[in-house]
Amino acid sequence: MDVSAIRDRIKLIETKREFLVQLLERPDLGTLRIDVNQAIEEMDDLLEDFNRTFPDQN
């Protein structure tokens, strides 16, 4: 898999992150709020690791 394919998948993951952020704003989430928050934190860590490993070369 080349870097551009990985970047495309990372962009897809970033869009999923936005969905989780919107989900977190729902008042009826209950205890799932903890899991959603944890998922966002883990995604942020993964995205940070990716950006550190493959810095933008623009």
Image (spheres, rainbow, N blue to C red):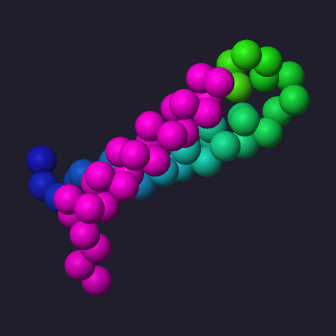
Task: Place residue 37 in its image quadrant.
Answer: top right
Task: Place residue 57 in its image quadrant.
Answer: bottom left
Report whether 56 appears left or right of 14: left
Image height of 7 relative to 29, above or below: below
Q: Quadrant of the C terminus?
A: bottom left
Seen at 82% across and 33% down, the residue is 26
Seen at 28% across and 54% down, the residue is 50
Evaluate whether residue 8 shows in this view.
Answer: no
- The magenta stretch is 34-58
Picture coordinates of residue 3, whole percent (x, y): 17, 58
Picture coordinates of residue 48, whole percent (x, y): 36, 55
Image height of 53 relative to 33, above or below: below
Picture coordinates of residue 9, whole percent (x, y): 34, 48
Report whether 5 appears left or right of 44: left
Magenta span: chief secondary structure: helix
Report whether 47 appears left or right of 53: right
Report whether 41 appears left or right of 51: right
Evaluate whether residue 18 shows in this view.
Answer: yes
Residue found at the very far right of the displayed protein:
27
Seen at 52% across and 32% down, the residue is 39
Q: How many marks?
A: 0
Which is more toward the observer, 26 or 38?
A: 38
Residue found at the very far bottom of the displayed protein:
58
As for residue 22 lying within the magenta part, the answer is no
Seen at 40% across and 46% down, the residue is 45
Image height of 22 relative to 29, above or below: below
